Image (tube, grey):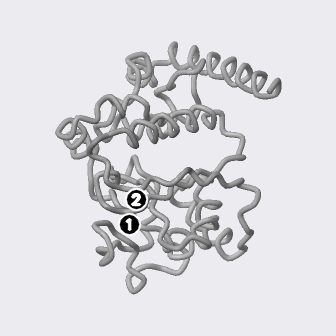
Amino acid sequence: ELSREACTVQPIYVYGDNRLSEKYEIKAMQKIMEELINRQETKAELLPINFIDKNSIPLNNNITKAFNQISKETQLGSQHEWLARLAYNYPGLEIGTEAAPLEVSNILKAINKYGELKKDESSNGYILNPNKSKMNVMLVLGNFKFPIIKKTGHDMKNNIQLWGYEQIMKNVWVCHTPLFGKPCGLCHPCELKIETGMGFLLTNSALKRYSRRENQPYKTIYKIARKISIRLEKRRSSKK
């Protein structure tokens, strides 16, 4: 959506937290950037990706303490602790959280419990309302902008089809714990996409695993397969 506007886009990617999806994410970003740059409709200046080592993000005890308080009651993902520390140094950093039911989206659960969104006057997105949000959530999420937080997966799918970006979207990677190099359909990011109408971003096998995730025999099989896959991924990484 941003690529279609006359603006400058600076993508930021944080690496170094040992997530198995890292190499797949980087490959996906590079493909998407390449295809967008070559699209006739692209008006934006797309800057090279700014790669930031997670270990280089300055510590902030106040943010860490606030995150720990929030995560106890909302299961907010551990990445939001270091993302909050990153955003402290990049105020206005955009984060791509879409509309979703509270039982699915932990970040929306945190916002709903501790704060309130308001329209961002400088863009079409939203920010936390400092007058209606508690200090702990302002420390963790107050430096972010949320450009698509009111857009559902169905909204985005409609735009993708309207603008003809289906081919580009095939490059998108959402899975946090790939299963033998493919989306697992079982991790929270996969679950979030499926339950918000963006399941078309995943493979048929991932969607099938998701539908069987509560079936005990399959649950056991997937647990064993995931352990094997993780070991193989770590072994490959250690050889590089």
Q: Residue 124 appears at what percent x and percent y?
A: 28, 67
Q: Quadrant of residue 52?
A: bottom right
Q: Secondary structure at mark 2?
A: helix
Q: Residue at x 42, y 54 (%)?
A: 96
Under circle 1, the secondary element is helix
Picture layout, residue 235 above or below residue 98? above
Q: Residue furthest right?
A: 239
The percent position of residue 171, horizontal first and vertical second, equals: 43, 31
Looking at the picture, tell me which residue is in the foreground, 141 or 1. Answer: 1
- Observer able to see residue 48: yes
User: What is the x, y in percent for residue 138?
Assistant: 51, 76
Identify residue for label 1: 112
Give yes or no for contact between labels 2 and 1 (Cβ–Cβ under 8 Å). Answer: yes
Image: 229 above or below 76: above
Q: Residue visible at 40% across and 43% down?
A: 37
The kind of residue tagged 2 is Leu
Q: CA distance from mark 2 to mark 1?
A: 6 Å
Residue 115 appears in which quarter of the rendering? bottom left
Question: Which residue is denoted by mark 2 in the rendering?
Answer: 108
> What amino acid type should be assigned to the residue bearing mark 1?
Asn
Furthest residue in direction bottom, as rendered: 131
- Determine whether, in the image, residue 182 is placed left or right of residue 204: right
Q: How many marks?
A: 2
**Residue sitting at 73 percent across and 68 percent down?**
58
Mark 1 is surrounded, within 10 Å at the Cα level, by few (under 14), some (14 to 19) or many (20 or more) other residues, namely few
Residue 97 drawn above or below residue 197: below
Name the spot of residue 44 as percent of width and height, x first.
Answer: 36, 56
For label 2, count other residues whose C-alpha is less than 10 Å away and answer few (under 14), some (14-19) or many (20+): many
Q: Quadrant of the C terminus?
A: top right
Q: Is residue 101 visible?
A: no
What residue is shown at x 38% (from left), y 72% (from top)?
Answer: 127
Q: In the drawing, what numbered circle is on residue 122?
A: none
